[in-house]
Image: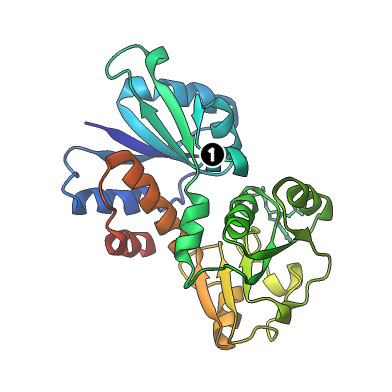
Amino acid sequence: MPRLAVLGYPVGHSRSPAMHGAALAELGLGEEWSYEAIEVTPDAFEARVRAMPGEGFAGANVTVPHKGAALSLADELSETAREIGAANTLVFAGGEGGEAEEVVVRAENTDAEGFLRSLPGSPSGRRALVLGAGGAARAIVWALLREGAGVEVWNRTELRSRHLSEELGGETVGEPDQSAYELIVNTTAVGLGGEDPFAELPLAAEGFAASQTVVDMVYGGEPTALLRAAAAAGATTVDGIEILVQQGALSLETWTGRPAPLETMRAAARG
Ligand code: ATR
């Protein structure tokens, strides 16, 4: 009976258990596999992960604030996870029913590929603005650069965007011209707590154009103020739920070896 989980702190708001539970049921694996939410503090994270293979876990998703720690503790890293510097997926391989030390913990990152799959088209050759310089921004910048987009990074604390650009590539921008980009991606937490994106970010509600694609990684029950303004201008919008679904689908395929049922996952994630 393989178990799966999402590890976070806090994790109560996560849509992953509902999404993966529905997917496992759709695949006919609902009786065999399970997926649960586990809240774990940063102090307890490594010990918790090390105990999981012995408790029947086949893998886990990792979310805020553990994506860096997941990378550090892993025995094996995918090249993507290593280059991004964060992991959102763990796979426990070998050591079935045996000693914990025989189990290899492999860290992967499906956030980057999941983001690319959520876009309506290839970002190759496009001019892109990424807002934010945290863990989420790293995966997005890495993915866009790999696809050959021109990437500019704005962050409230410019020192962080400078570090990100030095490490991954792209350029830091202090005062972005909103109309100049074909793709705008908000990776900051702005909007999560009800903040006004047009007060906190270098964007104007009236500044979007129909030719643009606007992505907001923040998700809730309703479209965010950012996406509402973009949609009103006729822009193509992508929300955080679609990215959650796409990264989750890639993780599920890694664990089960089965194609993920995207529509079922989307419906469950949207609640
Ligand atoms: P994550 O891993 O989700 O990216 P993070 O590393 O804590 O989380 O990064 C949060 C991002 O949101 C940062 O880019 C942060 O900007 P700072 O580096 O200046 O802190 C950004 N952020 C959070 N609140 C913000 C606000 N009110 N205005 C602008 N940016 C904000």
Q: Nearer the viewer, residue 42 or 78?
A: 78
Task: Please tell me whether residue 161 is drawn above or below residue 213 in the rendered image.
Answer: above
Image position of 99 (left or right of 107): left
Q: Quarter of the image holding residue 50?
A: top left
The 10 Å Cα crowd at callout 1, few under 14, some 14 to 19, many 20 or more, is: few
**Ligand 1 visible in quadrant:** bottom right
Q: Quarter of the image holding residue 131?
A: bottom right
Q: Quarter of the image holding residue 216?
A: bottom right
On-image quarter of the C terminus = bottom left
Task: Please tell me whether residue 271 is drawn above or below residue 252 in the rendered image.
Answer: below
Which scheme is used to colour this image of the protein?
rainbow
The residue singled out by tag 1 in the image is 79
Residue 79 image offset from top left, x and y in percent: 54, 39
On-image quarter of the N terminus = top left
Residue 52 image offset from top left, x and y in percent: 39, 25
Q: Nearer the viewer, residue 216 or 79?
A: 79
Task: Please tell me whether residue 157 is drawn above or below residue 34 in the rendered image.
Answer: below
Q: Residue at x 32, y 46 (%)?
A: 253
Q: Residue at x 51, y 27 (%)?
A: 74
| Callout 1: SS | helix
Residue 80 image offset from top left, x and y in percent: 54, 43
- On the question of residue 116 being in view, the answer is yes
Count of all numbered marks drawn on residues in the image:
1
Residue 67 image offset from top left, x and y in percent: 56, 39
Q: Amino acid at mark 1?
A: Glu
